[in-house]
Amino acid sequence: MNEIQPDKTFLIKLAHTKMPFGKYEGRYLIDLPEHYVVWYHNKGFPKGKLGEMLETVYTLKVNGLEELVRNIQRNFSKI
């Protein structure tokens, strides 16, 4: 049985990435309001790395795991 291992580099980058545009420009992705991330989930995430990160944030928020990313913010420097 293969165990899925999270990409630590991706999670560290996610923890330090801010929204690059829009109403919530400059806010860490993990700090975006849940309704906004759900809206993206329903509308479709942007292409590329930002879309992957927003989709991950959606999954984390739906499962109540935001604190995981906040711990990374506190304990790991930017890559």
Image: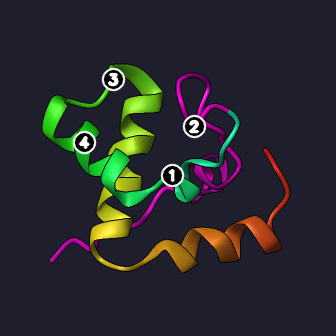
Kind of residue sitting beneath label 4: Trp
- Residue 62 lies in magenta, yes or no? no
Label 4 crowding class (10 Å Cα cut-off): few <14, some 14-19, many 20+? few
Q: Earlier in the sequence, mark 3 or mark 4?
A: 4
Q: Position of residue 40 (x, y in %)?
A: 27, 37
Kind of residue sitting beneath label 3: Pro
Badge number at residue 49: none
Q: Quarter of the image containing the N terminus?
A: bottom left
Labels 3 and 2 touching (C-beta < 8 A):
no
Kind of residue sitting beneath label 1: Leu
Q: Earlier in the sequence, mark 1 or mark 4?
A: 1
Name the residue tied to disc 2: 24
Taking 13 as reference, is 7 above or below it? below
Labels 1 and 4 touching (C-beta < 8 A):
no
Taking 32 as reference, is 71 above or below it? below
Residue range of the region highlighted in magenta in the rendering: 1-25
- Residue 20 lies in magenta, yes or no? yes
Q: Earlier in the sequence, mark 3 or mark 2?
A: 2
Labels 2 and 1 touching (C-beta < 8 A):
yes
Name the residue tied to disc 4: 39
Name the residue tied to disc 1: 32
Kind of residue sitting beneath label 2: Tyr
Residue at position x 66%, y 44% from top?
27
Q: Earlier in the sequence, mark 4 or mark 2?
A: 2
Q: Quadrant of residue 30?
A: bottom right
